[in-house]
Image (tube, helix red, strand yellow):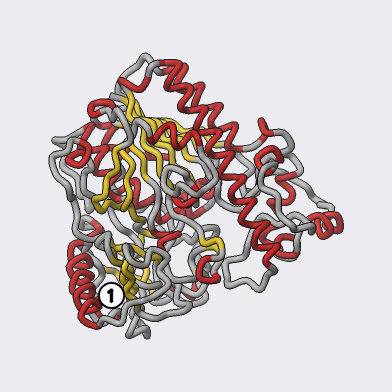
């Protein structure tokens, strides 16, 4: 069997009509859903982008001991295990974080890899003297007055036609891979698409049926904050997000067309998901990282076509699942006899209708922020109780997203030899300083830091937290269990008074 794994970035499930009937139509996602298992309670693990990818590769939560960083020497990644068992793996991606310092080692796990340049702040095109005055007139201050966003304005100077967009070029490469290899067996293709991650930039045709009353400069990249913006500006940002989702839908349709052309439905699994969602004004918040991990970020789409258990019609899966379960599933399919350390649970029993549940809880969050847990019916946010000297980085690769750890961060290194999550490797234990250059910059999403329980059935928008101390105690007990199973560092139990 072969597999195509399509990984979008920041794709909100409520933007897809197969999840939210009132959403703008996404016909390609609907088309896939007609022959796929559609998972209704699929949750994130480690946040944001690269921690999520480390989860996906290793099948283990990493936010409990590490912020955004490279693949560690002690990580066992599923593409390497596939290759060991005769399965060729190929990565196609425009996710530019892979070629930053904090993306070291990820693409090396695959048999081969192809990269497409130009997304977001990718340092791609050389423009020694960019037209800053024109940029200030052309773009909203939310873009033009944020220096870190200037590389994107340069990149856009070289992306004019739809064929120039990185997502289009990635799908071009995927179609070429499938044309070349569709008659071969035992391969895995990871098609990783940075969109609909901000900036929400799409060809004009995807905005034609999304008019707003906004008449200002280009506004398609919100700050991560509770923004003081007008209703017209909010609608413009939301419309631009819908437009880029429409472009993603179109590009997924091209993948489905290739499945049709080469008859891949009978031989090839197709998995479509994302790393996390994005706040578009819910609870007054925009973005991710700095706010509570509400469901627009935490509960994400997952669609799985599995040729050995073909769906004649859409099959909804209500069981609780999590991103780390994908790695466990692939290893269950391709190398079931391979010993591997996984926290994930294989989805195969759900696809084979052998069970209606594979896990009781999903634990998720961002390094330094809240612990969040769900059983599929409720969510619970737990914030640190004891903050002083309770947050440490455990690593052999002291690198942040785009910079090395500073001398100050490395001054008080402690070597740890018995961390159970490291497979016996000695580790550096480093104080997680508040001013370290990791996202979010202050060590965790601690804004609006109030413990809350939400009833996801009765209150899906999470507007009305429950005043139920007994439920909080129940979920604290579940968190202790999850932390123990995840081999969490011992100070986390004290940090969260667990």
Measuring 40% from the left and 69% from the top, which residue is drawn there? 462
Residue 417 visible within the image: no
Left or right of 241, for residue 264: left
Position above or below: 169 against 284: above
Measuring 74% from the left and 37% from the top, which residue is drawn there? 160
Q: Residue 400 placed where, x, y %?
A: 49, 61
Q: Residues within 10 Å of mark 1 (few under 14, many from 20)?
A: many
Q: Dot 1 lies on which element?
A: helix
Measuring 70% from the left and 68% from the top, which residue is drawn there? 230
Q: Residue 184 placed where, x, y %?
A: 35, 16
Residue 24 visible within the image: yes
- Name the foreground residue: 221 vs 51: 221
Residue 390 lies in what quarter of the image? Answer: bottom left
Q: Residue 13 placed where, x, y %?
A: 44, 50
- Name the foreground residue: 207 vs 112: 207
Considering the image in quadrants, where does the C terminus appear? bottom left
Measuring 47% from the left and 23% from the top, which residue is drawn there? 177
Considering the image in quadrants, where does the N terminus appear? top left
Disc count in the image?
1
- Name the foreground residue: 90 vs 406: 90
Residue 46 lies in what quarter of the image? Answer: bottom left
- Name the foreground residue: 110 vs 322: 322
Q: Residue 140 placed where, x, y %?
A: 75, 61
Q: Read off the residue under disc 1.
A: 492
Left or right of 371, for residue 483: left
Residue 445 lies in what quarter of the image? Answer: bottom left
């Amino acid at each position: 069997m072969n597999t195509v794994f399509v990984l979008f970035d920041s794709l909100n499930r409520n933007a897809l009509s197969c999840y939210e009937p009132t959403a703008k139509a996404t016909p390609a996602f609907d088309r896939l859903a007609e022959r796929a298992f559609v998972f209704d309670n699929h949750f994130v693990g480690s946040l944001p982008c690269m921690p999520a990818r480390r989860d996906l590769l290793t099948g283990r939560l990493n936010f409990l001991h590490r912020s955004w960083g490279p693949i560690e020497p002690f990580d066992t990644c599923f593409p390497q295990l596939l290759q060991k068992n005769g399965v060729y793996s190929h990565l196609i991606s425009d996710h530019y974080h892979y070629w930053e310092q904090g993306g070291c080692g990820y693409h090396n796990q695959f048999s081969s890899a192809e990269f497409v340049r130009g997304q977001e702040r990718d340092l791609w095109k050389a423009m020694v003297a960019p037209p800053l005055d024109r940029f200030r007139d052309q773009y909203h201050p939310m873009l033009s007055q944020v220096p870190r966003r200037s590389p994107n304005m340069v990149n856009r100077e070289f992306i004019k036609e739809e064929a120039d967009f990185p997502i289009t070029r990635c799908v071009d490469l995927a179609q070429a891979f499938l044309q070349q290899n569709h008659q071969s067996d035992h391969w895995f293709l990871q098609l990783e698409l940075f969109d609909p991650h901000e900036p929400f930039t799409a060809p004009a045709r995807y905005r034609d049926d999304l008019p707003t009353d906004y008449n200002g400069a280009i506004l398609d990249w919100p700050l991560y904050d509770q923004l003081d913006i007008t209703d017209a500006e909010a609608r413009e940002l939301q419309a631009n997000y819908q437009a880029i989702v429409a472009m993603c839908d179109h590009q997924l349709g091209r993948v489905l067309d290739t499945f049709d052309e080469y008859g891949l439905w009978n031989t090839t699994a197709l998995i479509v998901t994302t790393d996390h969602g994005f706040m578009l004004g819910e609870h007054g918040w925009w973005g991710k990282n700095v706010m509570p991990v509400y469901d627009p970020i935490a509960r994400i789409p997952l669609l799985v076509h599995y040729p050995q258990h073909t769906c004649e019609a859409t099959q909804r899966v209500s069981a609780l699942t999590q991103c780390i379960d994908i790695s466990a599933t692939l290893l269950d399919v391709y190398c079931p006899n391979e010993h591997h350390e996984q926290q994930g649970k294989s989805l195969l029993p759900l696809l084979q209708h052998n069970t209606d549940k594979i896990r009781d809880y999903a634990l998720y969050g961002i390094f330094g922020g809240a612990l969040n847990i769900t059983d599929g019916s409720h969510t619970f946010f737990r914030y640190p109780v004891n903050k002083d000297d309770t947050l440490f980085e455990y690593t052999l690769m002291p690198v942040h997203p785009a910079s090395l750890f500073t001398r100050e961060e490395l001054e008080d290194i402690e070597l740890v030899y018995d961390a159970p999550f490291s497979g016996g490797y000695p580790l550096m234990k480093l104080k997680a300083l508040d001013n370290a250059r990791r996202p979010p910059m202050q060590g965790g999403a601690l804004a609006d830091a109030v413990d809350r329980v939400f009833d996801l059935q009765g209150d899906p928008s999470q507007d009305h937290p429950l005043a139920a101390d007994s439920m909080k105690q129940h979920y604290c007990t579940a968190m202790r269990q999850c932390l123990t199973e995840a081999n969490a560092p011992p100070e986390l139990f004290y940090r969260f008074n667990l």
